[in-house]
Image (spheres, helix red, strand yellow):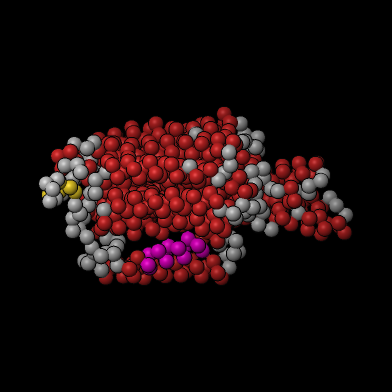
Amino acid sequence: MPTTESQDRKSPWLILGVLSMGFFMTLLDMTIVNIALPHVMSGVHASLDEGLWVFSAYILGYATLLIVAGRLGDLFGPRRVYLYGLAIFVGASCLCGIAPNAGVLIAARTVQGIGGAMLAPQILPIVTMVFPPSKWGAAFGFTGALSGLAVLTGPTLGGVIVSYLDWRWIFYLNLPIGLASAYLVLRHVDDYRPGKRQPLALVPTALLILGLTGLAFGLIEGERLDWGLAAWAAIAAGVLVLTWFAVDQRRHQRSGPLLPFDLLRLRNFASANIIASIMGFSMLGAFLPISLYLQIVLDMSPLRAGFTIAAMPLTSALVAGVGGKLSDRGSGKAVILTGLACFTAGLGSFILVTGTDTSTLQLLGPFVLTGLGMGLVFSPLFSVGLRQVPPPQAGVASGLVNTAQEVGGLLASAAIGAVLSLRLSSGLRHWVDQQAQALPVEARAGFKQAFAPLTDGALKIGSAGPPPAATGAGDPSQVAKVQEAFADAFTSAMHSGLVLPVALLAVGWVAAFLLIRDVPAPSFGAPKPPPARTTTSGATAATETA
């Protein structure tokens, strides 16, 4: 066993690098699925609604458990919870790989999200313990650069796998990465304990999970349910349960609450949650339609689409470290404001330049601007937001910020999915009506009925757009007309959907300008290794603290 002296000599950068492997894997999985989604939908015969659930189920499992997982890390040690989350994530990835249909795949993706939720919040508490506060910006800049690298690798690697293997290998890839990560964590990361043990109350935990689940389900399924009674009932039930949770937490603020309200009174921490939710909405709300657009409208192969998108995360990875260092020097607010402005400009210019015949060169500028914004926002955001948070609360604070980001992603999945589905069906219905006007009156009803699969809101989209059965297969000229109409309708629907994140990013810039304050690094003292005990054989070993 390593001695306490050897533990003191462990490089905090080594510890951060080892922990980041699992985090890298979860981000890699999300971006690979993003670029491979058209092929996944074809492989399991999924409708657009089911395809959105393949994307959203992971976020649902992830978002509902983050706060709880952050508290579990505070109570039982972040390394232990990290390893359990890693095991769940890898096991669920294997189930995704063998999924025979969309239902099984969606369920396995939900379990994947639960594993990712247990893993992700454990990194930041350990960072606050092994790095001095003056280096937090650089450390978070490293994780930001790694995130950019994952987003860069995901589309490219996903394109290679889909082009030369099979979409199922995007999930099997997690097995070797997960095993290597577990080995290195056990070897190099000590069992740090950020706070005292407190019981995890089951009632508020259940209320939080049920409330977030009901809210997310209603939002994601709202369009498919025509925003009827079932959708609004799920949303209302979620809001009601979350209100019950808030009231319960208010009564238990002095007895180990799951959600400490004193954290939300910290101005920068509250601001970080607002910006994280807006960034989550904007990123996930943009990436899904962009990936579909490149492959379905511009007819790119998955590999080419991956390399095209790579300009965005590559730029993000290159600037993340710079943003973190500037944050350490007291310029976090300026960096975040610059990043939000770049992200807004990037998405806005993407809307302006995209059409059914846009070239790759025209996409380069918007993607670089968007990546610049991502890198400059995320690298200082956690440093600025957690700067006033005491280390014993770092786990739950990390869970809150990550939850805010993922709830933003859930809202984006629901809102952008609804806009895409509604506008796509509307555009295609308008085209069918126009075509029918050129036919004799008695033939119009039959013509519209023949193209009902295009306009009924349950269109099954594959990597080549709508299936032949929905395009009047058998008449090449008619198929070409339908494909052209589909491209026009999808591009218009995408533009309408992307207006939402652009508007929210502008709101985020105003919020950051008004709320964030540059504050000096806290002085919580030097980080300490785990306490040691002497065994009967005279060796020293790390032990748990009560």
Residue 221: x %, y % from top left: 55, 61
Residue at x 59%, y 36% (from the top left corner): 164
Q: Residue 268, can we see it? A: no
Task: Specify whether 24 is left or right of 12.
Answer: right
Determine the main secondary structure of the stretch shown in magenta: helix
In the picture, which quadrant includes the C terminus? bottom left
Is 248 inside the magenta-drawn segment? Answer: no
Residue bounds of the magenta highlight: 206-218
* Residue 519, image x, y percentages: 23, 43
Q: Position of residue 86 (x, y in %)?
A: 38, 49
298 relative position to 161: left or right:
right
- Residue beneath the point at 45% across and 44% down: 174
Q: Nearer the viewer, residue 489 or 217?
A: 217
Q: Is residue 478 left or right of residue 66?
A: right
Q: Nearer the viewer, residue 396 or 6?
A: 6
Establish if 250 lies above or below 467.
below
The quadrant in which the N terminus is found is: top left
Residue 226 shows up from this direction? yes
Quadrant housing residue 222: bottom right
In the depicted structure, whether residue 297 falls above or below residue 265: above
- In the image, 494 versus 536, the foreground residue is 536
379 lies above or below 65: above
Q: Quadrant of residue 188?
A: top left
Q: How many marks?
A: 0
Q: x, y (%) of residue 390?
A: 21, 51
Q: Looking at this rendering, what residue extends furthest in the front direction?
A: 537
